C-alpha cells in the first residue's frame, strides 16, 4: 500500500511541475521579469538628463519613452506562439542575449535616433522574454491555488523591479552619465543566460499543424500600425503619415482575426474571448494600463521639474508606490481566495481611482505626506487590479494555449501602456500648452517653443532672463500643474469605467483539482518490479 501511495504521489509531483523544482523555476522566471521591469522604469528619472544632452524634439522624446512598449506589444503574439513551437526556454534565452546587446547600444547612444533604435531592440528582447515567463509559469503550476501564489510572487518581483529602476537610475545619474541606466541590464543578462540554460525546463505547446508565419506577421504589423497611428494622434499630428498606419493596421488586425477563425489550427485560439472571464480580464488590463502608465512618467517630471528634486530623491519619493504594489502582490493569492475575482478587481480599480483623486492635491509646493499617502494607495490598488485580472485570464485559458494566452495578456498590457502614454500625453499637452500663448513680455516664438514641454520652457526662460524669463518659468510651472490635474481626472474616469467592467468577472475563485491519471495497483507493482 505504501508503495502504491508513493508511486501515485510521485506521479502527482511530476504532473504538477516536478515537485519543489517548480519553485526554483519560479525564481528564475522572476529574475527574467526583473530584467524587463527594471528597464521599463529606469529611464523615467533620466528623461530630463536625456533631454538636456540629446536635445530631442517633443515627438522624439515621446518615441524614446514609448517605442519600447510599442515594439514589444507588436511582437508578443509572434514570439509567444513561436515559443510554443520551438521551445519557450529557447526563445527566452535569445531574448536575454538581445536585451543585453541592445542595452549596450542604448548606453552609448549619441543621438535621439540611435537611442530610439536601441529602445526598439530592447522591445524585441522584451517580447521574447515576457510571454515565455508567463507561459512556463502556467505550465509548471497547474493547480490554481499554487498558481495564484506564484503569480503573486511574480507580480511582486515586477513591483520590486519598478522600485529598483528609479532608485538605481537616480543613484547612477548622481554619479555617472544618463547612459549608465541601461548598463544595469548587462550584469542581469550575464547571470540569467547560464542560470536559465541550466535550470529552466524546456516547454512547448501541442504543436498541432504548421506555425502560421503569415498570421504572426499580420498581427505584428497590424498592432504596430495601430499604436503608431495613435501615438501620432497623441502628439497632435493629423496628416497622412498618421492616417495610413492607423487604417492599414486596423485592416491587418481584422484580416488576422478572420484568418484565425478559418484555420483548423489557429495561431491564437480566439474562442478564448468567448469566455466572459477571459475577455473581461484582458479589457481590465488594458484599461488599468491605459489610465495609469503615463502617470509615473508625469509624476517623475513633476517631482524633478516642479519641486526641484534630484533624480535620486525622485526615486525615493516613488518608492512607496512600488513597495505597496509588492505587498499587494504577496497578499494577492489570499485576497483572491477570500473575495473572488469580481470583488478583488472592482476594489482595486476603486482604490486606485481614490488614489488618483487624492493626488489632485499636488501643487506648486511640496506636500510629502500627501504624496506618500497617494502613492501607497496607487501602488496597492493598481497591483490588486492587475493581479486579479492576470490570474483570471491565465486560469481561463486551456493549458495547451498557455503561450497564446500569455501573449494576449502581455500584448494587452503593453498595448494599454503604449496607447496610455500617447493618450495621457496628449491630454497633458492640450491642457498645458494654451496657457503659455500669451505670457507678458515673452515673444510668440519663445512661447511656442515653451509649449512643447516644461523642460524646454525652462530652457527658453533661462535664455530670456530677467522678468520675462521668470514670468515664463512661473507660468509654465503653473500650466504643468494644471495639466497634471486634468490628466488625473481623465485617469480617474477610466478607472471607474474599469470597475464597472469588472462586474462581469466570476464572483468566486473556482479551484479545480489537478487531474492526474494514477495507475492501478497492478501497474504500479509491475513498474516496481521492472525497476
Image: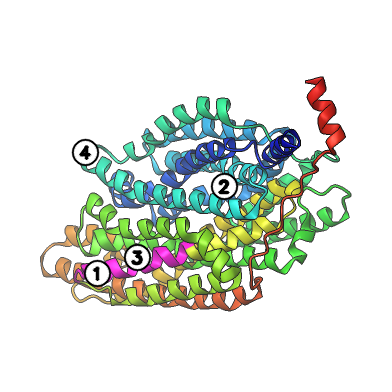
Cα gap from disc 3 to disc 4, whole angstroms: 29 Å
Relative image position of residue 82 (x, y in whole percent) = 71, 39
Q: Are marks 3 and 4 in contact (CB under 8 Å)?
A: no
> In this picture, is 43 found above or below 458?
above
Q: Is residue 189 left or right of residue 51?
A: right
Between 186 and 472, which is closer to the camera in this rendering?
Answer: 186
Q: Is residue 237 visible?
A: no
For disc 1, the marked residue is: 477
Mark nearer the N terminus (3 vs 4): 4
In this rendering, the label closer to the viewer, 3 or 1: 3
For disc 3, the marked residue is: 376
Q: Residues within 10 Å of mark 2 (few under 14, many from 20)?
A: many
Q: Is residue 1 left or right of residue 368?
A: right
Relative image position of residue 52 (x, y in whole percent) = 28, 48
* Residue 58: mark in rendering: none
Mark nearer the N terminus (2 vs 3): 2
Q: Quadrant of residue 303?
A: bottom left
Cα gap from disc 2 to disc 4, whole angstroms: 31 Å
Q: Are marks 3 and 1 in contact (CB under 8 Å)?
A: no
> In this picture, is 515 found above or below 443?
above
In this rendering, the label closer to the viewer, 2 or 3: 3
For disc 2, the marked residue is: 72
Extreme front residue here? 1
| Range shown magenta | 365-383
For disc 4, the marked residue is: 175
Amino acid at each position: 500500500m505504501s508503495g502504491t501511495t508513493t508511486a501515485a504521489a510521485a506521479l502527482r509531483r511530476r504532473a504538477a511541475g516536478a515537485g519543489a523544482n517548480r519553485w526554483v523555476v519560479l525564481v528564475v522566471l522572476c529574475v527574467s521579469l526583473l530584467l524587463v521591469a527594471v528597464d521599463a522604469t529606469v529611464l523615467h528619472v533620466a528623461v530630463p538628463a536625456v533631454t538636456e544632452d540629446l536635445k530631442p524634439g517633443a515627438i522624439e522624446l515621446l518615441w524614446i519613452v514609448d517605442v519600447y512598449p510599442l515594439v514589444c506589444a507588436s511582437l508578443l503574439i509572434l514570439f509567444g506562439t513561436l515559443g510554443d513551437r520551438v521551445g519557450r526556454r529557447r526563445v527566452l534565452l535569445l531574448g536575454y542575449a538581445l536585451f543585453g546587446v541592445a542595452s549596450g547600444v542604448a548606453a552609448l547612444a549619441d543621438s535621439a535616433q540611435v537611442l530610439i533604435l536601441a529602445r526598439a531592440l530592447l522591445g524585441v528582447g522584451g517580447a521574447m522574454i515576457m510571454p515565455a515567463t508567463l507561459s512556463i509559469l502556467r505550465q509548471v503550476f497547474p493547480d490554481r491555488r499554487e498558481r495564484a501564489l506564484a503569480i503573486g510572487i511574480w507580480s511582486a518581483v515586477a513591483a520590486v523591479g519598478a522600485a529598483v529602476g528609479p532608485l538605481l537610475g537616480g543613484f547612477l545619474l548622481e554619479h555617472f552619465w544618463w547612459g549608465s541606466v541601461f548598463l544595469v541590464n548587462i550584469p542581469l543578462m550575464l547571470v540569467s543566460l547560464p542560470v536559465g540554460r541550466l535550470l529552466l525546463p524546456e516547454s512547448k505547446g501541442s504543436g498541432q499543424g504548421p506555425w502560421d508565419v503569415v498570421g504572426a506577421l499580420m498581427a505584428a504589423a497590424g498592432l504596430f500600425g495601430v499604436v503608431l497611428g495613435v501615438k501620432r494622434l497623441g502628439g497632435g499630428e493629423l496628416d497622412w503619415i498618421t492616417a495610413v498606419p492607423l487604417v492599414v493596421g486596423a485592416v491587418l488586425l481584422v484580416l488576422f482575426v478572420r484568418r484565425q477563425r478559418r484555420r483548423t489550427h489557429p495561431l491564437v485560439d480566439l474562442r478564448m474571448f468567448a469566455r466572459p472571464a477571459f475577455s473581461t480580464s484582458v479589457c481590465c488590463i488594458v484599461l488599468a494600463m491605459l489610465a495609469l502608465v503615463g502617470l509615473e512618467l508625469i509624476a517623475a517630471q513633476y517631482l524633478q521639474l516642479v519641486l526641484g528634486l534630484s533624480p535620486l530623491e525622485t526615486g525615493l519619493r516613488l518608492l512607496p508606490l512600488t513597495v505597496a504594489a509588492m505587498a499587494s502582490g504577496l497578499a494577492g493569492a489570499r485576497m483572491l481566495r477570500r473575495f473572488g475575482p469580481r470583488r478583488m478587481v472592482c476594489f482595486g480599480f476603486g482604490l486606485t481611482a481614490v488614489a488618483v483623486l487624492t493626488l489632485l492635491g499636488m501643487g506648486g509646493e511640496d506636500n510629502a505626506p500627501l504624496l506618500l499617502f497617494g502613492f501607497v494607495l496607487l501602488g496597492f490598488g493598481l497591483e490588486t487590479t492587475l493581479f486579479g485580472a492576470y490570474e483570471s485570464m491565465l486560469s481561463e485559458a486551456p493549458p495547451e494555449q498557455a503561450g497564446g494566452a500569455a501573449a494576449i495578456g502581455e500584448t494587452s498590457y503593453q498595448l494599454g501602456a503604449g496607447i496610455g502614454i500617447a493618450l495621457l500625453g496628449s491630454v497633458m499637452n492640450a491642457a498645458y500648452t494654451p496657457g503659455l500663448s500669451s505670457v507678458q513680455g515673452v515673444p510668440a516664438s519663445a512661447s511656442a517653443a515653451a509649449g512643447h514641454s516644461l523642460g524646454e520652457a525652462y530652457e527658453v526662460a533661462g535664455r530670456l532672463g530677467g522678468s520675462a524669463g521668470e514670468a515664463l518659468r512661473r507660468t509654465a510651472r503653473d500650466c504643468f500643474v494644471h495639466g497634471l490635474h486634468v490628466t488625473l481626472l481623465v485617469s480617474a474616469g477610466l478607472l471607474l469605467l474599469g470597475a464597472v467592467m469588472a462586474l462581469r468577472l466570476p464572483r468566486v475563485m473556482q479551484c479545480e483539482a489537478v487531474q492526474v491519471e494514477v495507475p492501478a495497483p497492478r501497474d504500479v507493482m509491475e513498474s516496481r518490479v521492472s525497476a
